[in-house]
Image (tube, helix red, strand yellow):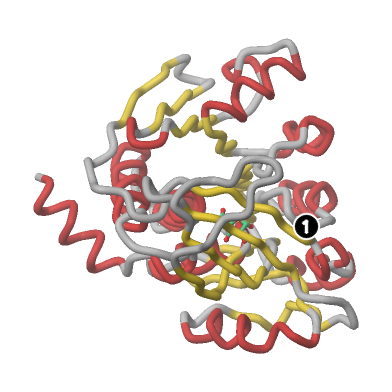
């Protein structure tokens, strides 16, 4: 079936730094690179490299051509991406010697996605298709409502976390993806544990420790470990996980296999620099899983 992803497209401007600067400190960078990023674009690239038919919904400005060519190179359908008279989204990223990052985003065109374009794209979708969402665009709620009316699976990464954006979406979400910090923030905002949100499946990622799947119907919480790797750059690891997980569920894998595959893909992505550029292809993930046993 098809993955429809309403998501941001950013130009990532990445500085490698010896450490994150303190307020008032001026620091010399060790290197600079530009690449395709945005939580949405990264998730589309991950889903496409996992082998899923992927349609990206979003918007860029006139300086977004290079980013679109990179998405196109992965076979992603861009016919519903709006070209607007605004700046393309941008992210200023610092990555330190341990692979940790610090990110500032400028929304630009990402928060001006025309709602009619989303509705038009979803008109062709149906039961068995998947809608993927994050928090770097406008229009998530009407898209989620339309998708659920069509019987689609809705996979939502609640990042960057914003309690006001998350709460109204929850009744329409099939799979909610949170990291541990976001899970704690959501519990504080709603006064509920992640198991009490009314979402059928909640996956809490725990960085190098893997992920926990909370299955509301089965009333279970199952931990899935992550393969151990030496981190170079953790940027986009959560997006790699989300895109691979959505694609794997779409391809009919069970939860256990889908989580193992998504965690393996995310682990591989942190061993190299960049966001979209670091996302492994399906065959590489399969080999990595075979070696890990
Ligand atoms: O999740 C990583 C992404 O966050 C980066 O690619 C950056 O563009 C921001 O959206």
Secondary structure at numbered mark 1: loop
Q: Is residue 249 visible?
A: no
Placement of the C terminus among the 4 image quadrants: top left
Residue 109 visible in the current orientation = yes
Q: To which quarter of the image does residue 51 belong?
A: bottom left
The relative height of residue 273 versus residue 27 in the rendered view (above or below) is below
Out of 230 and 185, give the one closest to the viewer: 230
The residue depicted at 46 percent of the width and 69 percent of the height is 31
Which residue occupies 37% across, 45% down? 98
260, above or below 143, in the image: above
Residue at the image position 33 percent from the left and 65 percent from the top:
280
Quadrant containing ligand 1? bottom right
Q: How many labels does the image show?
A: 1
- Residue 235 coordinates in the image, percent (x, y): 48, 54
Left or right of 15? Residue 218 is left
Q: What x and y, as percent, mark residue 156?
A: 63, 44
The residue lying toward the viewer, choosing from 235 and 244, is 235
Q: Bin the neighbour count of mark 1 within 10 Å (Cα to Cα): few under 14, some 14-19, many 20 and up.
A: many
Residue 50, percent across and down?
Answer: 38, 65
60 lies left or right of 248? right
> In the rendered view, does 231 fall on the left or right side of 116?
left
Q: Does the residue tagged 1 have its C-beta within 8 Å of any atom of ligand 1?
A: no
Front residue (pair 160, 282): 160
Asked if residue 168 lies left or right of residue 14, the reply is right
Name the spot of residue 211 as percent of width and height, x first.
39, 32
- Residue 69 in the image: above or below residue 157: below
Which residue occupies 83% across, 72% down?
117
> Up-down: is 221 above or below 274?
above
Residue matched to label 1: 137
Q: In which quarter of the image is residue 23?
A: top right
């Amino acid at each position: 079936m098809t993955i429809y992803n309403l998501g941001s497209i950013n130009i990532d401007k990445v500085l490698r730094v010896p450490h994150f600067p303190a307020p008032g400190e001026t620091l010399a960078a060790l290197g600079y690179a530009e690449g395709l990023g945005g939580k949405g674009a990264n998730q589309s690239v991950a889903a496409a490299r996992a082998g899923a038919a992927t349609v990206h919904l979003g918007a860029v400005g006139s300086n977004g051509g290079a980013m679109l060519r990179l998405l196109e190179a992965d076979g992603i359908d861009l016919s519903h991406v709006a070209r607007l008279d605004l700046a393309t989204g941008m992210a200023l990223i610092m990555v330190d010697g341990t692979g940790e990052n610090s990110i500032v985003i400028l929304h630009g065109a990402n928060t001006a996605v025309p709602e009619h374009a989303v509705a038009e794209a979803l008109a062709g979708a149906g039961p068995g298709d998947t809608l993927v969402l994050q928090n770097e665009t406008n229009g998530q709620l009407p898209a989620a409502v339309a998708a659920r009316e069509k019987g689609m699976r809705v996979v939502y990464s609640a990042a960057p976390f914003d309690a006001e954006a998350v709460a109204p979406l929850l009744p329409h979400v099939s799979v909610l993806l949170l990291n541990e910090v976001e899970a704690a923030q959501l519990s504080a905002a709603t006064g509920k544990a992640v198991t009490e949100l009314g979402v059928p499946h909640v996956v809490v990622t725990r960085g190098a420790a893997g992920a926990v799947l909370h299955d509301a119907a089965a009333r279970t919480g199952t931990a899935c470990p992550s393969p151990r790797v030496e981190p170079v750059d953790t940027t986009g690891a959560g997006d790699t996980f989300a895109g691979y997980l959505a694609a794997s569920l779409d391809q009919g894998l069970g939860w256990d296999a889908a989580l193992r595959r998504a965690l393996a893909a995310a682990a591989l992505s942190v061993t190299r620099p960049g966001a979209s550029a670091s996302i492994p292809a399906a065959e590489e993930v399969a080999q990595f899983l075979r070696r890990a046993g």
